[in-house]
Amino acid sequence: MQSKFYVITFVLFAIADALTTWFGVKMGFEEANPFLAGRISSGAGFFGSYSLYTAVGAGVIAVSLRLEKFSPAFRAVAIGMVILKAIPAVNNILLLAGAPVSGIINSTVGAVLENLFIG
């Protein structure tokens, strides 16, 4: 059950990230990831790359949660994968909503780092 939750959450953030990246670039934003920037001109190449990455990420999450029976530390891999996919999705949503860049850094990356290392 938990495996499904993490995988579904990861996939939903990946879909949000892909769609907001696509629309953001079409609106004039620049893609920072050079791997994806080269594929953004082709919808099939862009969404195909994203689909492959998402499938691999979902697989890593599923395997890490199966390995949790050997060590609870494997759950951190699943949580980390979801967080790493959530950050760009939330950043893109905030950018498309018109939030200033400094506010985005403070609200997403800053909050994650604060909770991981301070809180």
Image (cartoon, rainbow, N blue to C red):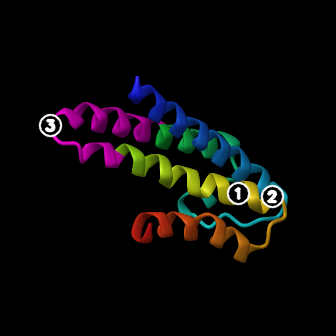
Q: Are marks 2 and 3 in contact (CB under 8 Å)?
A: no
Q: Name the residue that disc number 2 marks.
A: 96
| Secondary structure predominantly adopted by residues drawn in magenta | helix
On residue 10, the disc is none
- Whole-percent x, y for residue 114 in the image: 49, 69
Q: What residue is rendered at 48% in x and 43% in y? A: 53
Q: Nearer the viewer, residue 91 or 31?
A: 91
Circle 3 — which element? loop
- Whole-percent x, y for residue 14 in the image: 58, 43
In this picture, which residue range is highlighted in magenta? 55-77
Q: Name the residue that disc number 1 marks.
A: 92
* 47 sits left or right of 76 in the view: right
Q: Name the residue that disc number 3 marks.
A: 70
| Real-space CA distance between mark 3 and mark 1, rounded to the nearest whole angstrom | 37 Å
The N terminus, quarter of image: top left
The C terminus, quarter of image: bottom left
Circle 1 — which element? helix
- Whole-percent x, y for residue 91 in the image: 67, 60
Q: Amino acid at mark 2?
A: Leu
- The mark that comes first in sequence, 2 or 3, is 3
20 over 9 or under it: above or below: below
- Whole-percent x, y for residue 73 in the image: 24, 48
Q: Are marks 1 and 2 in contact (CB under 8 Å)?
A: yes
Q: What residue is rendered at 75% in x and 59% in y? A: 94
| Real-space CA distance between mark 2 and mark 3, rounded to the nearest whole angstrom | 42 Å
Q: Amino acid at mark 1?
A: Asn
Give the foreground label among 3 and 1: 3
Q: Nearer the viewer, residue 1 or 15?
A: 1
